[in-house]
Amino acid sequence: MQTAALHILLIDDIKTDIEEITNQLGQTIASQFSLTHFSDMRESVECIKSNHPEINVIVLDLGLLSDCSPQEIFSVVKNVAKQIPIIVITGKEEHDLAIFVMNAGAADNMTRGNFSNAHGKLGDAIEFSLVRSRILKDSRKLTTESENLREQLMSYIGGGYSYGV
């Protein structure tokens, strides 16, 4: 059985990072993948909204040249990405920003410029975020099913079901 190709959306405007990320992914992700890249927020958001092709993970540089703050950039992408894992790229001196985005729902954080020094870390971050995302989705499904069963049980206990003769 062949698995579907992984589709990664890269939102970054630094040419050297784009090249390094592309190289790292090619060397470290074992599964087949495709990469879509945008340098600007508007195009990126439109791509996420259309979700065509289906995006499995987003790699987002918070240092985009934009009128928005890094926190706003993350919030905009997170709001349209719904349940798609987002791996954030921050600068070396942006520890507080990294903590903010992790608390706001980022799947992982990478430090800009460390791609070549941390061989395989980006590929690992992508694969781990996909596993966590699947586990969360399964957990939400089980929670919903459990709540539905609880409601049915409470209805039954309260006499909500009638049995015909």
Image (spheres, helix red, strand yellow):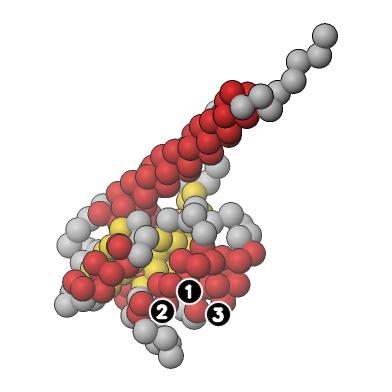
What numbered label is drawn on residue 72?
Answer: 2
39 relative to 127, above or below: below
Q: Amino acid at mark 2?
A: Glu
- Residue 62: image quadrant is bottom left
The answer to the question of whether label 1 and label 2 lie on touching residues, with beta carbons closer than 8 A, is: yes
The residue drawn where x is 74% and y is 20% is 162
Eye-nearest disc, 2 or 3: 2
Question: Residue 68 versus residue 149: which sits nearer the camera?
Answer: 149
134 relative to 58, above or below: above
Question: Residue 158 versus residue 35: which sits nearer the camera?
Answer: 158
Q: Secondary structure at mark 2?
A: helix
Q: Quadrant of the N terminus?
A: top right
What numbered label is drawn on residue 42?
Answer: 3
Eye-nearest disc, 1 or 3: 1
Q: Secondary structure at mark 1?
A: helix
What numbered label is drawn on residue 136?
Answer: none
Count the labels in the image. Answer: 3
Q: Earlier along the polypeptide chain: callout 1 or callout 3?
A: 3
Check disc 1: other Cα within 10 Å, few if <14, some if 14-19, many if 20+: some
- Residue 155: horizontal and vertical position, in percent? 62, 29
Q: Which residue is mark 1?
A: 76
Q: Amino acid at mark 1?
A: Val
- Distance Cα–Cα, label 2 vs label 3: 13 Å
Left of 36 or right of it: where is 90? left
Check disc 3: other Cα within 10 Å, few if <14, some if 14-19, many if 20+: few
Left of 125 or right of it: where is 37? right
Question: Residue 119 versus residue 133: which sits nearer the camera?
Answer: 133
